[in-house]
Image (spheres, helix red, strand yellow):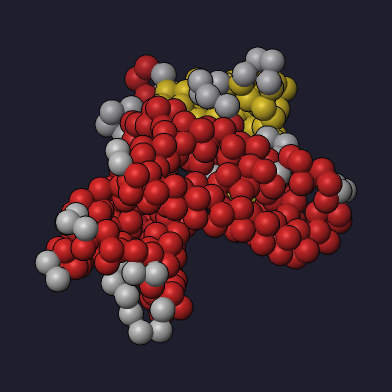
Amino acid sequence: MNIIDRYIIKKFLGTLVFMLMLLTIIVIVVDVQAKSPNIEKSGYTVGYFLLHFYPFWMIYLVITFMSILVFISVIYFTSRLANNTEIVAIISSGASFHRFSRPYFVSAFAIAVFSLLLNHYFLPMANVKKNKLLIYTKSETRQQEAKSNVKISAQMSPTEYVFINSYNRQENRGSGYMYQKFDKNKKLIQRITAMNIQWDKDKKAFSLNSYYEKKAGKNDSEILTNGAQMYQSFGHPPEELFPDELLGEDKTTPELIKFIQREKEKGNGNINIYLNELYSRTSMPVSIIILTILGLSLSSEKKRGGIGVNLALGIALAFVFIFSFEALKIVSTTRTLTPFVAMWLPNFVFAPVAVFLYFRRANQ
């Protein structure tokens, strides 16, 4: 690695760190001002959230949008190199554009690998801390909606179903419980109803109060039992049995894969939101390399208008990338596209464009 390589890598990483620090300061200041009334109404202080929420929330934002930050950083410092005719001087000294680009690739690959590890293992741990307090940053109406009782209709296995008329996720209790089990011929062989249901942490099972049970006996007979209390276990805690949308964020990739496989075995067809989370953890780091090539190709030539033109173009492309990524998440949850295609489609579209522009610039 020669002096030019070290110089470009230093510029690359230095600009990225500056962008990260600037983003952190601006986002936290703006977000705290907007959400402090909601936080204080919830019984917390802003100081508590600055220590226990915002550090983890910023980790989430930075890792999630690392590819965009890298893209804008590359455009910014490469445009400065081009405007100062430093790129012309380097290439005029005998180095090819491919040789000039090497430190970009090295830096982008290192950042992508680092982001890949963070996405799969470290980010979920930060998300656990973030998601515990996230609801208290919302409006009072949104908090009430999140804490209100909901209807549950869940498939426990290919032959078992649970229905709860009113269930509170915060307290893990509900009313109007019904459990059904069918045989391989789809004949009902067991049904349990109960007035109330409550999760028992010690027994790791649900406590059913005022229950009524009906089982299929021999020769089409029925066995009826009832009582004040019984326990029923499904082998997993309530948050696993009745998952919300944020559960996937809280799991490391090995845990998430096991969870998705378990949901598939249960027959749950509503798992695209978790598959989106799984595939995006790899597609986003890969996009760092693609967007680095694209940013280098767009900003390495001196243009009339200087850095401002390149930054405007870069921000516009970053907006398109983010918008397409978020839109495809919604499309995937409606099952119009498979999660794999949805989470990788921006890369599939941007990669050929980046490669074309790179070789076009290299051959100039």
32 vs 19, left or right, is right
Q: In this view, does 310 lie above or below 268?
A: below
Extreme residue toward the front, this view: 93
In the rendered view of the protein, which quadrant contains the C terminus? bottom left
Residue 187, visible in the rendered structure: no
Q: Quadrant of residue 203?
A: top right
Q: Which of 59 and 339 is in front in this view?
A: 59
| Residue at the spot 81% in from the left edge and 59% down from the top edge | 36
Residue 67: percent from the left, percent from the top? 41, 54
Residue 189, visible in the rendered structure: yes
| Residue at the spot 21% in from the left edge and 63% down from the top edge | 92
Extreme residue toward the bottom, this view: 304
| Residue at the spot 61% in from the left edge and 48% down from the top edge | 58
235 vs 117, left or right, is right
Q: Which of 101 and 216 is in front in this view?
A: 101
Q: In this view, does 69 lie above or below 63?
A: below
In the rendered view of the protein, which quadrant contains the N terminus? top left
Residue 46: percent from the left, percent from the top? 83, 51
238 vs 141, left or right, is left
Q: Is residue 317 above or below residue 224?
A: below
